[in-house]
Amino acid sequence: MIRRALIITALWAGTGGAVLAHEFTVGLYLEGPGSKARLAEIVAGFLLAADERDGHAGETSDGHLGGVDVQILPLPRGVGEDIAGLYGNPAQSPDVVIRFGSTRPSDIDIPPTTPVFEAGTLDPGQDWQQSDFAARYAATYGTSPTRDAAQGYNEARRLDMAIRPLDGLTPGPAFEAAILATAGGLEW
């Protein structure tokens, strides 16, 4: 018991007082007409990407991005309660928010320090409807992907690229720079 306490104390001290978690919660925010159905499509695309590289049987999260467990929190709260495919247990407050559409998430309860990023654009030179993504999406869900599904997939890929070299969301400036570097399009 003493040895365990020493290990925990050493970990705490070695991280500057912060416990390093190997998971994070991403808020996916969309409001407006038809937002519930659109958000379900965004989540479906996101889940496909979150399972591609590091997925495994018996997961307790909604997938993995950058080798880190990801929990998905549809926003605003309550809009995604019955979205299929979500198995994780997201934190009450997201660690990062991706905003789809032009409405700023001012009415959701997130700390002011939580980074909020606008969804990036799909690569203009890429025909996502004829991509490997479209084939994997159709095989998984039995239907062709919508633009919203492709956008969800794109955002998960952007997060994966930003997180993988950092093994998480920190340091914040490096994570932010990596996300912003792919805002104009990401080839997948």
Image: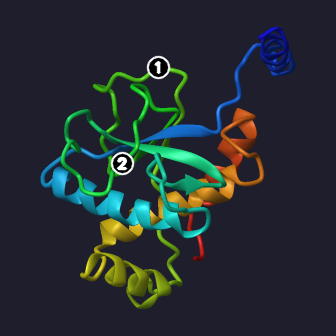
**Label 1 vs 2, first from the N-terminus:** 2
Asked which quadrant contains residue 4, the reply is top right
- From the viewer's side, name the closer residue of 91 and 177: 91
- Percent position of residue 119, x then y: 45, 54
Q: Quadrant of the C terminus?
A: bottom right
Q: What residue appears at the point 41 percent right and 35 percent down from the top-left corner?
A: 90
- From the viewer's side, name the closer residue of 68 and 30: 68
Q: Secondary structure at mark 2?
A: loop
> What mark, if any, has residue 87 been given in the picture?
2
Would residue 103 be visible to someone looking at this image?
Answer: yes
> What mark, if any, has residue 111 been given in the picture?
1
Q: What residue appears at the point 13 percent right and 55 percent down from the top-left corner?
A: 34
- From the viewer's side, name the closer residue of 103 and 31: 31
Q: Left or right: 126 with respect to 90? A: right
Q: Indicate the amino acid at tag 2.
A: Tyr
Q: Residue furthest left?
A: 33
Mark 1 → mark 2, Cα distance in angstroms: 24 Å
Q: Left or right: 15 with respect to 19? A: right
Q: Indicate the amino acid at tag 1.
A: Pro
> What mark, if any, has residue 11 been given in the picture?
none
- Percent position of residue 61, x then y: 47, 47
Q: Quadrant of the N terminus?
A: top right
